[in-house]
Amino acid sequence: MGLLAGLAELIAPTRCAGCDLPGALICDDCHHHAARFARAQSCPRCGAPFGAFVCTECWERSFAFEAAIALGELAPPLSRAVVLHKDAGERRLGETLGRLLGEEVADCWPHWADAVTWIPPTHTALVRRGFDHGLALASPVGTALCAPVMPLLTRAVAKDQRALGRDARAANAAGTFGSLGAPPARVLVVDDVLTTGATLDAAAATLLDAGAEVVRVAVVARSW
Ligand SMILES: [Zn+2]
Ligand SMILES: [Zn+2]
């Protein structure tokens, strides 16, 4: 540890984002607690923790992405860690959460991706936070998979919803992304939270339109 890092530890010791125990950003107990949501019990399409079969939500709709992995459910400690990383300035958590997610993905889908990308923030969110939290999570995942981390998506400027009818509004919301360059065949998209899957679905559809063959997603936390 360098002098500055040592001083920083004296003033504000590293604490677990889940339980406040000093020592690590996410302690072993909290990691294991999050991982009790084992992938053996998760829907292989969307990552929902309802059993190792395609869940009812996935019967009713088809996602553009082929499969999803979540590190755990959106509950403490992960929910707390996601917020501390995104909105409370604990930027080191990006590396920690991304590394844990990368280990999980490398374990489930070894060497699967030709590229790792992430959901780009809106301009407003980027200015407010001062950093791209998706990139921070995606970088260690790329390292774990030995795959390049590439910016493949842009935020399209959404049209004013008020002038649009209902169907057009849905299409406008889904068309939030544009593609940057030609994606390789197998793309893994990283994000912090998957709830309805609409954002990741739109991102995957954009990548497929741009020439990717298969898109999968990996998120820190799954909520429903
Ligand atoms: Zn803890
Ligand atoms: Zn599902």
Image (cartoon, grey):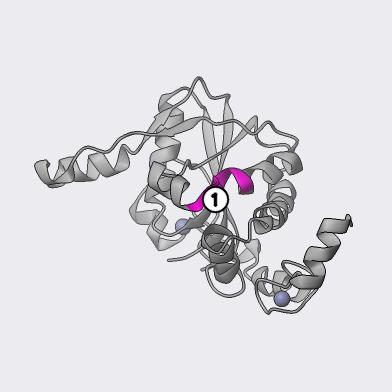
The answer to whether any part of residue 165 appears in the image is no
Residue at mark 1: 68
Disc 1 Cβ-to-ligand 2 distance below 8 Å:
yes
Residue nearer the viewer, 118 or 68:
118
Q: Main secondary structure of the magenta part?
A: helix
Q: Residue at x 39, y 47 (%)?
A: 124
Ligand 1: give its quadrant.
bottom right
Where does the image place residue 90, in percent across and percent down from the top left?
Answer: 63, 61
Q: How many marks?
A: 1
Tell me where the magenta segment starts and ends, as one range: 129-136
Image quadrant where residue 93 sits: bottom right
Q: Residue at x 35, y 51 (%)?
A: 61
Magenta-colored stretch includes residue 133: yes
- Left or right, 21 with respect to 65, comes to right
- Residue shown at the point (75%, 69%) measured from the top left: 14
> Magenta includes 125?
no
Q: Is residue 122 above or below residue 179?
A: below
Disc 1, SS: strand
Q: Considering only vertical position in the picture, is 73 above or below 190? A: below
Residue 217: image location, x then y, percent: 54, 46
Q: Residue 177: give x, y in percent of width and height.
A: 38, 35
Quadrant of the rendering where the N terminus is positioned: bottom right
Which amino acid, by three-letter code, is at mark 1? Ala
Q: Position of residue 184 (x, y in %)?
A: 58, 24
